[in-house]
Image (tube, grey):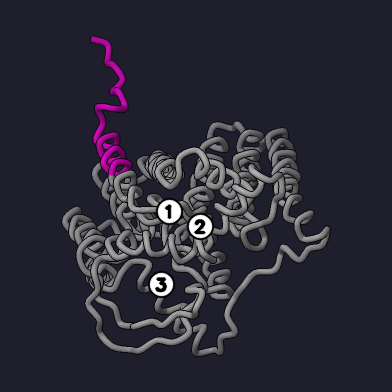
């Protein structure tokens, strides 16, 4: 008898992604979001479409999401802009699953997708009108094209990712170096030449996407400036430590740390170094160095998170029950309770924490807290 290929919609990953997409979509009904940059992008896109006048939302400009979010908000308000985010967030997880299913078991690969997809920062990014999922999606789609050797479409997708968030350029550069190394090992000189041309195309397109910012800045490079607080060393270190803890959540992080330590003492970590593994580690290290320089938003750490979770599961090889418990703690962090160690006070524009009281504070889950504040944020930022 001839084996028939299993249809995608009959696989567990389809149901997993469908549930996540529905979750993001429903949460998107509460409003645009709580990030000032969301409303700056809406204004940038709307002014471009309605008045023919482009101004970047903040340096260095995020042309693709500004145009998509601003234009979509004109068509259908936050419902349309948030559904786009939900689609991009879900598609990113699908593309990630395609990469990790080759090195993880079927169950573990789905659990990893759920742990990432239900991380509250990823949920918020995928259910509000922000640009994080834009850069993640285009970067993952570009990697998919590279795997298929469609390197010139990959360059276009990578350029879209750079236009969405400039900091992703460093990650893309490392990805190109990885494929150069693979083609060099395989002695594919012609393919290395094509990769070089693809990289040139990427740089040309990326520069073109920032031409509108250059023009808006009166033909200067003023648009390359970025805003960061005037923090002392303690202020920088406290932000770095706190934001790494609350990327994962206090309870999920403690559980993950304890389980990892127990497993390492019992079984150790056994793996063979390879180019893909080393590339993932290099990306994490370099993006961490960038975050240490600019420790502004926890969501800046999402690219590292998408790499680190499957990497830890691959290296540590935890039991399935450990992953189920980690998933439960992650869901609790986002949707039930968030034990916090800081009570932060923000500036008048709500763009920066200016002080914090140390203590132990029980707050609602991060996602619940976020959606309950969206209407008030819309009223506040709309006036600004």
Mark 2 = which residue? 38
**10 Å neighbourhood of mark 2: few (<14), some, or many (≥20)?**
many
Image side of residue 55 versus residue 362, left or right? right
Q: Kindly indicate the quadrant of the structure image that contains residue 319.
A: bottom left
- Of residues 65 and 99, the one nearer the viewer is 65
Mark 3 = which residue? 244
Q: Is residue 20 visible?
A: yes
| The N terminus lies in quadrant | top left
Q: What residue is drawn where x is 46% and y is 60%?
A: 304
Sequence-wise, which precedes: disc 1 or disc 3? 1
Sequence-wise, which precedes: disc 2 or disc 1? 1
Label disc, if present, on residue 32 of the rendered structure: 1
Q: Main secondary structure of the magenta part?
A: helix
Find residue 51 and report its horizontal and vertical position in percent. Answer: 68, 46
Q: What residue is drawn where x is 37% and y is 56%?
A: 124
Q: Return the residue found at the far top.
A: 1
Q: In the picture shown, does residue 343 fall above or below 244?
A: below
Q: In the picture shown, does residue 373 fall above or below 310?
A: below
Sequence-wise, which precedes: disc 3 or disc 2? 2
Label 1 SS: loop
| The C terminus lies in quadrant | bottom right
Marks 2 and 1 in Cβ contact (< 8 Å) = yes
Q: What residue is drawn where x is 37% and y is 59%?
A: 375
- Of residues 214 and 174, the one nearer the viewer is 214
Residue segment shown in magenta = 1-22
Find residue 302 and report its horizontal and vertical position in percent. Answer: 45, 59
Task: Give the mark count.
Answer: 3
């Amino acid at each position: 008898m001839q084996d028939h290929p299993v249809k995608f919609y009959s696989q567990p990953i389809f149901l997993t992604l469908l549930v996540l997409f529905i979750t993001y979509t429903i949460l998107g009904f509460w409003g645009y979001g709580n990030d000032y940059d969301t409303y700056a992008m809406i204004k940038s896109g709307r002014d471009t479409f309605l008045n023919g006048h482009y101004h970047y939302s903040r340096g260095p400009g995020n042309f693709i999401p500004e145009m998509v979010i601003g234009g979509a908000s004109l068509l259908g308000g936050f419902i349309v802009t948030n559904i786009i985010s939900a689609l991009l967030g879900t598609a990113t997880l699908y593309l990630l699953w395609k990469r990790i299913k080759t090195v993880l078991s079927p169950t573990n690969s789905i659990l990893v997708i759920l742990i990432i997809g239900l991380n509250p920062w990823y949920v918020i990014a995928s259910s509000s009108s922000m640009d994080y999922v834009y850069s993640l999606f285009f970067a993952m789609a570009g990697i998919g094209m590279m795997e298929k050797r469609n390197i010139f479409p990959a360059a276009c997708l990578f350029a879209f990712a750079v236009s969405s968030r400039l900091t992703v350029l460093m990650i893309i550069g490392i990805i190109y170096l990885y494929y150069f190394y693979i083609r060099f090992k395989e002695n594919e000189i012609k393919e290395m030449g094509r990769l070089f041309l693809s990289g040139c195309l990427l740089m040309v397109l990326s520069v073109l996407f920032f031409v509108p910012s250059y023009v808006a800045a009166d033909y200067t490079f003023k648009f390359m400036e970025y805003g960061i607080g005037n923090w002392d060393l303690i202020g920088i270190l406290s932000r770095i430590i706190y934001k790494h803890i609350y990327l994962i959540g206090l309870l999920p992080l403690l559980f993950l740390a304890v389980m990892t330590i127990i497993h390492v003492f019992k079984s150790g970590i056994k793996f063979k170094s390879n180019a893909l593994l080393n590339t993932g580690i290099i990306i994490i290290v370099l993006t961490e160095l960038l975050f240490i320089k600019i420790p502004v938003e926890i969501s800046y750490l999402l690219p590292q998170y998408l790499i680190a979770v499957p990497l830890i599961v691959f290296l540590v090889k935890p039991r399935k029950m450990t992953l189920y418990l980690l998933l439960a703690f992650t869901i609790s962090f986002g949707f039930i309770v968030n034990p916090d160690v800081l009570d932060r006070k923000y500036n008048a524009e709500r763009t920066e924490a200016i002080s914090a009281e140390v203590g132990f504070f029980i707050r609602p889950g991060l996602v619940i807290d976020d959606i309950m504040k969206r209407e008030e944020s819309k009223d506040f930022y709309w006036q600004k």
